[in-house]
Image (tube, rainbow, N blue to C red):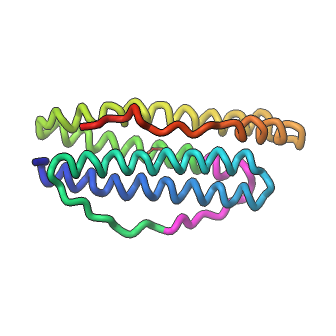
Amino acid sequence: MLNKKIAKLLNTQVNKELYSAYLYLDFANYYADAGLDGFAHWYEVQAQEERDHALMIRRYLINNGVKVEFLPIEKPDKAFKDHLAPLEAGYAHEQYVTSLITTIYHEAFEQKDYRTMQFLDWFIKEQGEEETNAEDMVKKMKLFGGDAKGLYALNQELAARVYTPSATGPQM
Ligand code: FEO
């Protein structure tokens, strides 16, 4: 049985990951509306990954005897001034998610909950990748997105992203 505080933090994290999926689908809506189908696709794939993260944490809680409680998912209330803005918001959001995972990890360390620390190791690594990807998107957009040709090429590149289920995630 998990410590109550850790169980609560993880339960909240399920909601945060589902919100991330919701947020990225909202970005996809923005790009679809702007005619940038490659960008929209990239964020649709990202939303699938976020749902996987939520399901992994949900499964961990269930496997450890915790009753999962679903909380309301916040409305992604973002208005974007240009095509760069969602990418910057995405990068900021990933940094925020990293801080949430770090907080849970720290609590697990304090409680000597090595099992949860081991479970979260995958997420610590994943957040490193998530931040790098999000930052790369911002950099590329700044470098190449300034003219129609560059934007078109970038859109094509992002359209090629393939969804890979996070099957290698922790099963504990
Ligand atoms: Fe589930 Fe993008 O972090």
Identify which residue is drawn at 67% across, 52% down. 85
Judge by depth and name the residue closer to the eye, 68 or 99: 68
Image quarter (top left, top right, bottom left or bottom right) of the C terminus: top left
Magenta region includes residue 78: yes
Position of residue 36 relative to residue 143, above or below, is below
Residue plotted at (20% across, 52% down) = 7
Residue 60 x/y as whole percent = 25, 45
Relative to 117, residue 103 above or below: below
Left or right placement of residue 26 versus residue 8 in this view: right
Horizontal and vertical percent for residue 48?
52, 48
Residue 45 sits in quarter: top right
Q: Is residue 143 left or right of residue 42?
A: right
Q: Is residue 23 magenta?
A: no
Quarter-wise, where is residue 160 in the image?
Answer: top right
Numbered disc total: 0
- Is residue 40 shown above or below 129? below
Q: What range of the chain is rendered magenta?
A: 75-88
> Would you say 65 lies left or right of 32 here?
left
Q: Position of residue 53 (x, y in %)?
A: 40, 45
Q: Position of residue 81 (x, y in %)?
A: 72, 59
Q: Main secondary structure of the magenta part?
A: loop
Q: Is residue 54 above or below residue 30?
A: above
**Residue occupying the point 43% across, 46% down:** 52
**What residue sits 77% from the left and 33% below the top?**
143
Q: Depth check: 161 or 124 in front?
A: 161
